[in-house]
Amino acid sequence: MLGTVIFLIIFPFVCAGVLALMRKSGPYRKCTLFVFCAVIAAVDIYFIVNSLVFDETQEYLLETHLLDNVMLFLEWALFVLIAYFSIRYKKYYCILLSLLQTGLITYLELTGQTESHIAHLYVDKLTLVMCLVVGLIGCLICVYAMGYMKDFKAHHSEFRDRRSFFFSMLFLFMGAMFGLIFSNNMIWMYFFWEITSVCSFLLIGYNQSREAVDNSFRALWMNLLGGLGFAVAIYYCVTQLGMVNLQQLIDMGSAVVFPVIFLAFAGLTKSAQLPFSGWLLGAMVAPTPTSALLHSATMVKAGVYLLIRLAPAMCDTLAGLMVTTVGGFTFFIASMLAISQSDGKKVLAYSTVSNLGLIAACAGVGRYEAVWAGILLMMFHAVSKSLMFLTVGAVENSLGSRNIEDMHGLIVKLPSLTAILVIGIAGMFLAPFGMLISKWAALKAYVDTQSILLVIFLIFGSATTLFYWTKWLGSLVSVHHHSERLENITKGSEWFALISLSVMMVALCLTFPVVSSYLIEPFLQELFHTEAVSVISSGNVLIMLMMIFMIVLLPVLVHFLTLGKKNKIVISYMGGANTGDDRSFVNSTGDAKRMYLANWYMESWFGEKKLWKPSIVLSAAAIIILLVMVIGGVA
Amino acid sequence: MSWILAIGFLVLAPLLGGLLEGADRVLCARMQGRQGPPLLQPFYDMFKLIQKQSVVVNNVQDVLVCGFLIFVVFAGLLFFWGGDILLVFFALTLAEIFFIMSSCSANSPYSSMGAQRELLQNMAYEPMILLTAIGFYLAANTFNVNEIAVASVPAIVYLPGIFIGYVFILVIKFRKSPFDLSTSHHAHQEMVRGLTTELSGNVLAIVSLAEWYENILLISILGLFFLNGTLWSVLAAVLGCGIAYFVVVLADNVFPRVKWDAMIKSTWIVTLVAGGINLMIMELLTR
């Protein structure tokens, strides 16, 4: 089993190296990439199944002096890389941030304080959940990227073709994620954490346009700030507590707040919570697979993964208060901001920020039911968000726009892609599908732990979430008469990813009780040392399954009920006389006037201009106050 | 018992819903100093609509409107069967989304505008709806309707604020106010008939039927505030619902020209103040 773990960490790095060398596009590169993905996915599944059969928490690697030194060397290599780019683009503050944290860790390593005989690698049920997310979804995104980047290059000839670099970064990212989720030694975790930061920086800057560079540096400094928090936490653990073992820290529970709150701070930056949401929103300048990867399988999931790991240590502490407050607040604010956006990718970005807020808040509550909801939410979010991003990317390639306004009547223009979008959207917010189940559990958990503020955030945030998703859904299904079908240029590899993800989405909706009882509940029982608690009763699960079947059967049922009933089909009413195709009407001067139906964006209520700055100030204030309280030793 | 209640809802709700609408129209007319239509007018309208051929813009509308009816009825059945009240509300939201989709699919300016307006209304009252479910949970320590209904102390004792908030949103849910709501048929506003502009004949009849079911369900939830398992409490519930309904009709007639922006602001404020404070007190009590 140790071999499999090491393979999963090392192999993506090897793939990255190979792909970086394959400069020429063509069938060879394509096949190589597909084979790599297939191998990773297969080993990933083998590992998960094997661990489930084996059914025990596993710990590996005790003596790793040489490896530690290699990592230290690589950390300095990362620093040099950051310094190089910072000087080249004159963003010197990044050097300072990077130097501080790398210096801190080096000091600890060289003074020999970090040597301890602990298990450096650790595998439990949460690791397996993350393996599912990182391995399967990550690979599907890579497969999709192959076809997508071809069209992207054709559409954006102004950017230099750096696809080999792009593919290699995707695999590097996956390798770093695997390293992160298997690590138990915090210094190792920190190492992989830094790699993901740098990777995302390089991926966001892929286009090398002015905007891309600016946004990539924003992502870099925010994540480096989080990395600094991570380093401070490690420094405290090593010097004050004499340990580098994450599990040991968690077992201490709420006794130590200082390192926990700094780790939580790192988690918040990486999961793009306010006031650090800017970097994830800026990340959408990069090609779609990057967004999908950052938003669903990697990066932000690393943040919430750390928060979920820390959950028991945050229960009823200032760290928990910080995470729940910021998370709940982010959930509400980001869902309002999403209302005012018409760019499809931006709506998705805000919805990611918003959902991550909910997951973070669940982790911050730190109780059994809340963490259950958080993990389930994370899984559903990973699948549905990657599905949404990839579909929007495919729509953009065929339609030439990713604006929701332009998606008006998409059901006639691109019916198959629209069907997938509808599955994704339904999975995001609608009863009885995916996310709603977890939201429901979260609501229950908040009420049970008497977190009134969170309850208020959740009920208002749910209402605003409903608004922006339904708005989008409504645009998709509107039927224009005499609309032409567009040519669907989605490639085979893209279809493969899209259909696999849709199947995963539906399968997860139908089988989430199984996932819960084999993966999530055993993890939580071990974590909280309690008996199994069923968060949603089996009766209610049955009722929800019934609802799903009713929705599926609805068209068939209605077809039979209305057999023989003749509807008279007419063109729609426009006030003025319809000119015959539902697009124009005769106006008062007798000319044909084109009609344009827009959605509501309520800029003056929920626009970025109005909400962005105050929410940054409020959330930053909350974080600073709580950090200062902990540093000052109030708790 | 629970099955009898559920089947009772299935059979009787259309009758009661129609009567409620008839009574509503008479009451409204009297408040405005008019004679008003006969009590059974909604039934006459319904029969007439069913017999008419429907004129639609596309065939998807049929399916979506049926989805609206089916999930409203499903929510009602779940409620009277004694199921989870949150799930009842989720099913109701799903039904609502089917309805909104049907008018979006028509691609006509008025039904589109109606759909956006309906969404806005949804956003306005959704927090209060969820808060109502949470209130019941805190009062009776369960989300199950059959257990809430036989709690030793009726929920209203603990939840006066949430009760007020719920009555407040009923004004929107019963399509009384604001003046320019999603199916508004008043002159002097831009909606024409909003959501139902492109629906007619027997498809429109399905919408009316679904709304009768929905209204009865909503008012039954109001009744749940008074129940504690005794026969007296049932009487109290009927009386309480009657008074609340009267207040709703009165509110509509006293504030006949409220616009959508005032609606969303006032609803969220009432939710926060009445509902939020009630929630805080409940949390303190159960601590």
Image (cartoon, helix red, strand yellow):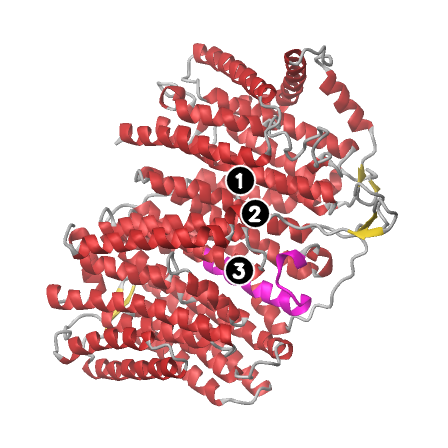
Label 1 sits on residue: B123
Q: What chain letter is assigned to the residue under label 3?
A: A
Badge 1 marks a residue whose secondary structure is helix
Nearer to the camera, B185 or A310: B185
Badge 2 marks a residue whose secondary structure is loop
Tell me if residue A392 is in the magenta stretch.
yes
Residues in magenta, as a range: A381-407
Query: Going from the N terminus, do you reach mark 2 or mark 3 first?
Result: 3
In percent of the image, x 64 and y 76: which residue is there? A155
Q: Is residue B61 left or right of residue B92?
A: right
Q: Examine the residues drawn in magenta and state their main secondary structure.
A: helix
Quarter of the view holding residue B23:
top right
Quarter of the view holding residue A173:
bottom left
In percent of the image, x 39 and y 62: which residue is there? A301
Q: x%, y% of residue B189?
A: 69, 33
Q: Mark 2 against mark 3, which lies toward the viewer?
A: 2
Q: Give the CA separation, mark 1 to mark 3.
A: 21 Å
Amino acid found under the numbered disc labelled 1: Met
Q: Give the CA separation, mark 2 to mark 3.
A: 16 Å
Label 3 sits on residue: A346
Q: Is residue B187 left or right of residue B172?
A: right
Work out whether A594 lies above or below B179. Answer: below
Q: Residue furthest front?
A: A589
